[in-house]
Structures are given as structure tokens and as C-alpha cells.
Image (cartoon, rainbow, N blue to C red):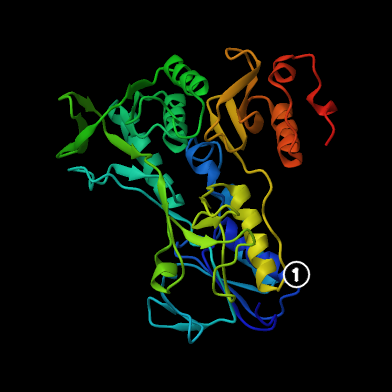
């Protein structure tokens, strides 16, 4: 716990950083609160970048999460384009790239995550792009426009959510798209096989070319820029843009250099506390230590928001465990997937509705207990699933598969 009249520094001006700053102020923190962002932009919403914004359905003004003047009214100082290079825990200071040192009584690390890069020959070309930031999305939007002008395809490397969302957006714009996935199925780490196969059919029905168990060997360029992706089997895929959707890694370097525990993220407890009582962490940069000693990494708006509230509470000397059911979503074409819970290790599944129908949900069971639900265009199923999972209730597979059974009638 820190004194509530001491200065707080928050490194990271995304969802977690903004939520933590506002939660501290509303919780009674009277000292200065400084929010540091390394991008030139103020806080903005990231989820639309691969969907509505990239499709041109959302302008930049509507991406704004909090305007600087709105933060100023809450006595939160926003500084953009600022890079923190080190944390001095003994002196309780952070050092900026220009040499300035900022004192803190409480420190929050909300540094997010960085896109993974593939170590491929030619991957440093200007038209090989990840998607994490607004600037990344702007470059990809320009790349899509270039593909349309040249009538050249887009190649997406990675069949995860970001890659598939970009693929769907590109197809909606009429571009030829090939998705390369190293595994045997799309979204193999997060979805049951039946849903992976359904997504493959969805994209194929929209004209996307899928290459599973694909091994890119090099990215080729000519005088005009990227020209093709060469695969290990010798085939070449002509293109004018390559989008990398191969995942992210926690941006935990500052914490590691400062001697805090890191393991695929900044290790925190369920109250977002690090081992240093003056330092909390929240969002995509964290790995939460569970009661059984294992670590859980979540990359979602919900996790960033709720962990940030817990981090603020921790600095205020309060315990606010974040243990509710995690949830996520993905928009591809006219289908919205809403996921509740974590389906890893599921041993059995139940299907509510028809897999080929307008809406359905897949219910995941492990050791006879409900652990997760994936709902496609079925918001009622999603909300019921979150209620059941939060309450620790398990409907039987027969109840799930009976469309006439009211899942809301289960006590909870």
C-alpha cells in the first residue's frame, strides 16, 4: 500500500492504464497521477482495429477512449510519445528515454504486449506488417488499398483471431486472400475441432484460400515491394501485402530489469499485486499466479479492465480479487463469436442449435463440469453461460442440446 497523497506513475496508456488511473481517482487517491504512453496517440480502443476501423466503417475520432481534456478534468496527467527505459525500485523512480526521472509512491505497469515476428528472410520489408497498434492498422489499411490498386492478393500468416479478422475484412473489400496456418486447423489452441472446422468452411465459403500446416520459407520482394511468399514445399504465393498474425508476447522487459518476477508476463496475484507492495500490474503484460501455482495469461478487454481496477485497489490498500469468468469476442464477416470461460483440456462437448444454422453454441466439459461456452450469433446463450460459470453450475449435455429447455431456469 502507498500513501494516497503520493504520486502515482502508470506506464501504459491503453485500456488497463486508463481504467487504473480513473479507478484510483474515484477511489480517493489525492496525489498526482501521471499516465505515460509510448505512442504519439492518446488512449484508443484496440479491438476495432482489425475489424470496423480497417474496413473503413469507423473513423479515428470514434476510436478515442478518453480525450486528454477528459482525463485532465479528473486530474490525470497524460503524456504521450514517452518511453520509459528503467525502474529504480530503491529510489522509487522511473527513468525516461530523455533522462528525466519521475518519482513514484505507487507504480502500475500496464505495458501490454508486443507482436511476435517471424524470423524469415525478407520479413523486414515495408509491406510485412503485424497488427497491434493504430499505426500498424494505418499501414495495413494503406497496404490493402495498394493491393486493390495493383489487383494483387494479400497473404496472412497465422490462423488466429487477428489473422482471420484481417482476412475477413480484406475479403469484404473484394481482395484475394490466402491464410497460412502452421497447425493442422485454424484457432487450434482456443477452439474445439468442430468450431475450427466451421471457421475454415466460413472463410472458404467467402473465398479465402486456406493452407494448413504451411511452412513459409521466405518473403520475396522486387523493385515495387513485396511480391510473394515462398513456402517450404517450393510453392510461391504472389502478393503485395503480408500480414503477420502469429500472436503476441507480454511486454515485461521493464519489470524483469527491475528484478520483479516474470514468466511469460509480469507475475501477479489475483489482486494484480507484484511482490513489491508499491508496484501493481494489469492487462496483457501480466501472468496471474493461480491457487495451484500455475500461471494464467489472458489477453482481453475484460481482463485489462478488471485487473486495472484490482491494481488500483491494491495501491489503495484494498483486496479486490479478479476471479470472474473470462470472456472474449471476435467478429468475422456477419458472425460474432462470444467466448466465456477457458476450454483448454475439455473432454466432451454439447451443441445447442445447428452448427450450420444462423446461431449456435458449443458447450465444453472437463471431468463432467462445464468449463467454457463458445456462442456464435447467440448472445442469450453467452450471457446464460457467463451466469452459470460464475455460479459454478453445470447443465447436463442433454439440457444444453434440448432447444426447449430454459437454461435460465437453473438455480444460481
Neighbourhood count class around disc 1 (C-alpha, 10 Å): few under 14, some 14–19, many 20 upward: some
113 or 315, which is in the foreground? 315
Location of residue 389 in the rendering, given as x and y in whole percent from the top left corner: 71, 37
Q: Residue at x 34, y 38 (%)?
A: 243
Location of residue 201 in the rendering, given as x and y in whole percent from the top left corner: 46, 16
| The quadrant where residue 105 appears | bottom right
Label 1: state its secondary structure.
loop
| In this rendering, position of residue 140 left or right of residue 269 | left
* Quadrant showing the N terminus: bottom right
Question: Is 351 rendered above or below residue 187?
Answer: above
How many labels were placed on the picture?
A: 1
| In this rendering, position of residue 14 left or right of residue 1 | left
Location of residue 44 in the rendering, given as x and y in whole percent from the top left corner: 56, 54
Q: Which residue is mark 1?
A: 27
Q: Residue at x 17, y 24 (%)?
A: 233
122 or 357, which is in the foreground? 357
Question: Is 238 rendered above or below residue 136?
Answer: above
| Res. 19 visible in picture | no
* Quadrant showing the C terminus: top right
Q: Residue at x 45, y 14 (%)?
A: 205
| The quadrant where residue 189 appears | top left
| Res. 174 visible in picture | yes
| In this rendering, position of residue 14 left or right of residue 177 | right
Question: Is 41 rendered above or below residue 163?
Answer: below
| In this rendering, position of residue 387 left or right of residue 249 | right
Location of residue 217 in the rendering, given as x and y in whole percent from the top left corner: 19, 35
Question: Is 183 rendered above or below residue 401?
Answer: below
Amino acid at each position: 500500500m502507498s500513501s494516497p497523497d503520493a504520486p502515482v506513475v502508470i506506464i501504459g496508456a491503453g485500456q488497463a492504464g486508463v481504467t487504473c488511473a480513473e479507478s484510483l481517482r474515484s477511489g480517493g487517491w489525492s496525489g498526482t497521477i501521471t499516465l505515460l504512453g509510448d505512442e504519439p496517440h492518446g488512449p484508443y480502443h484496440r479491438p476495432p482495429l482489425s475489424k470496423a476501423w480497417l474496413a473503413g466503417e469507423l473513423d479515428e475520432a470514434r476510436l478515442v477512449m478518453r480525450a486528454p481534456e477528459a482525463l485532465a478534468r479528473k486530474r490525470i496527467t497524460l503524456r504521450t510519445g514517452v518511453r520509459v527505459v528503467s525502474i529504480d525500485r530503491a529510489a522509487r523512480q522511473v527513468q525516461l528515454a530523455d533522462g528525466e526521472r519521475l518519482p513514484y509512491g505507487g507504480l502500475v505497469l500496464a505495458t501490454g504486449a508486443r507482436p511476435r515476428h517471424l524470423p524469415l528472410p525478407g520479413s523486414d520489408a515495408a509491406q510485412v506488417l503485424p497488427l497491434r497498434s493504430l499505426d500498424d492498422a494505418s499501414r495495413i489499411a494503406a497496404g490493402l488499398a495498394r493491393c486493390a490498386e495493383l489487383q494483387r492478393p494479400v497473404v496472412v500468416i497465422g490462423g488466429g483471431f487477428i489473422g482471420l479478422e484481417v482476412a475477413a475484412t480484406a475479403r469484404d473489400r473484394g481482395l484475394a486472400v490466402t491464410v497460412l496456418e502452421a497447425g493442422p486447423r485454424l484457432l487450434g489452441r482456443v477452439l474445439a475441432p468442430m468450431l475450427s472446422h466451421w471457421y475454415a468452411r466460413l472463410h472458404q465459403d467467402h473465398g479465402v484460400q486456406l493452407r494448413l500446416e504451411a511452412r513459409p520459407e521466405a518473403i520475396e520482394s522486387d523493385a515495387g515491394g513485396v511480391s510473394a511468399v515462398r513456402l517450404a514445399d517450393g510453392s510461391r504465393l504472389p502478393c503485395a501485402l503480408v500480414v503477420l498474425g502469429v500472436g503476441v508476447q507480454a511486454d515485461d522487459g521493464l519489470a524483469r530489469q527491475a528484478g520483479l518476477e516474470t514468466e511469460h508476463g509480469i507475475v501477479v496475484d489475483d489482486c494484480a499485486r507484484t511482490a513489491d507492495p508499491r508496484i501493481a500490474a494489469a492487462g496483457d503484460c501480466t501472468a496471474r499466479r493461480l491457487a495451484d501455482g500455475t500461471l494464467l495469461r489472458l489477453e482481453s478487454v475484460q481482463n485489462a479492465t478488471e485487473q486495472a481496477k484490482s491494481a488500483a485497489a491494491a495501491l489503495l490498500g484494498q483486496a479486490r480479487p479478479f476471479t470472474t469468468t473470462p470472456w472474449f469476442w471476435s467478429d468475422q464477416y456477419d458472425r460474432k463469436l462470444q467466448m466465456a470461460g477457458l476450454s483448454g483440456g475439455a473432454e466432451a462437448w454439447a451443441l445447442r442449435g445447428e452448427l450450420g444454422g444462423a446461431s449456435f453454441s458449443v458447450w465444453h466439459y472437463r471431468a463432467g463440469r462445464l468449463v467454457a461456452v463458445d456462442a456464435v450469433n447467440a448472445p442469450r446463450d453467452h450471457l446464460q453461460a457467463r451466469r452459470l460459470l460464475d455460479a459454478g453450475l453445470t447443465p447436463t449435455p442433454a439440457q444444453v442440446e434440448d432447444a426447449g429447455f430454459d437454461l435460465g431456469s437453473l438455480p444460481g
